[in-house]
Image (cartoon, rainbow, N blue to C red):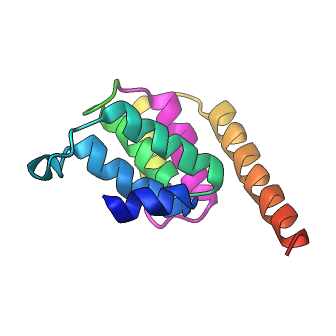
Amino acid sequence: MKYYEKAVGEKVRDAYANLAQILISGSAASFGIEKDINRGLDLLATGVELGSRECAYNLGCLYKAGKDVAVDDRKAAYYLGIAYLAKHEHAHRLLILLQQTSKLDFSVEIASAKRQIDQWELISLTQQDYR
């Protein structure tokens, strides 16, 4: 936990996914780390903003499964769309399954996902300009 917290403090994108998984699952309870779904969700959302496709994939899965959060197929589509557009290896298959099982039109969510990816690329270009 200490190292993940440090990595999050240094804005290491995928550390957000790892720390969030520990908090959401409660897997570190035997070490005195309480389950904290809200903080885990916040970490995942921040990771997405910073460019983590793993955080996007995890949020999409959480909103589809509805185990620790309420099922929300639109949020699931948005986050899985981000992960897919960022070339996460499993996101496309889950996005197709979501479309087939929900029968909803996710064009708005996918367009929003594309805007998020464009934002990541803009941030990346801006950061390169300052190096």
Can residue 10 be seen in this snapshot?
yes
Q: Position of residue 14 (x, y in %)?
A: 49, 62
State the count of labels: 0
In the image, is residue 73 part of the stretch drawn in magenta?
yes
* Nearer to us in this view, 130 or 90: 130
Query: Which residue sits furthest right?
Result: 129
Can residue 103 be seen in this snapshot?
no
User: Can you say whether 42 is above or below 97 in the image?
Assistant: above
* Nearer to us in this view, 80 or 7: 7
Q: Position of residue 94 (x, y in %)?
A: 42, 51
Q: Which residues lie in the magenta part?
A: 71-92
Residue at point 36%, 26% (across, down): 71
Q: Position of residue 8 (x, y in %)?
A: 49, 56
Task: Look at the magenta stretch and give its main secondary structure.
Answer: helix
Query: Which residue sits furthest bottom?
Result: 131
In the image, is residue 120 part of the stretch drawn in magenta?
no
Residue at point 33%, 28% (across, down): 69
Q: Is residue 32 left or right of residue 98?
A: left
Q: Is residue 104 left or right of residue 38?
A: right
Q: Quadrant of the C terminus?
A: bottom right
Q: Is residue 39 left or right of residue 131?
A: left
Q: Quadrant of the N terminus?
A: bottom left
* Nearer to us in this view, 101 or 67: 67
Residue at point 53%, 56% (across, down): 9
Q: Position of residue 90 (x, y in %)?
A: 43, 62
Query: Which residue sits furthest left?
Result: 30
User: Can you say whether 36 is above or below 94 in the image?
Assistant: above
Residue at point 73%, 55% (across, down): 120
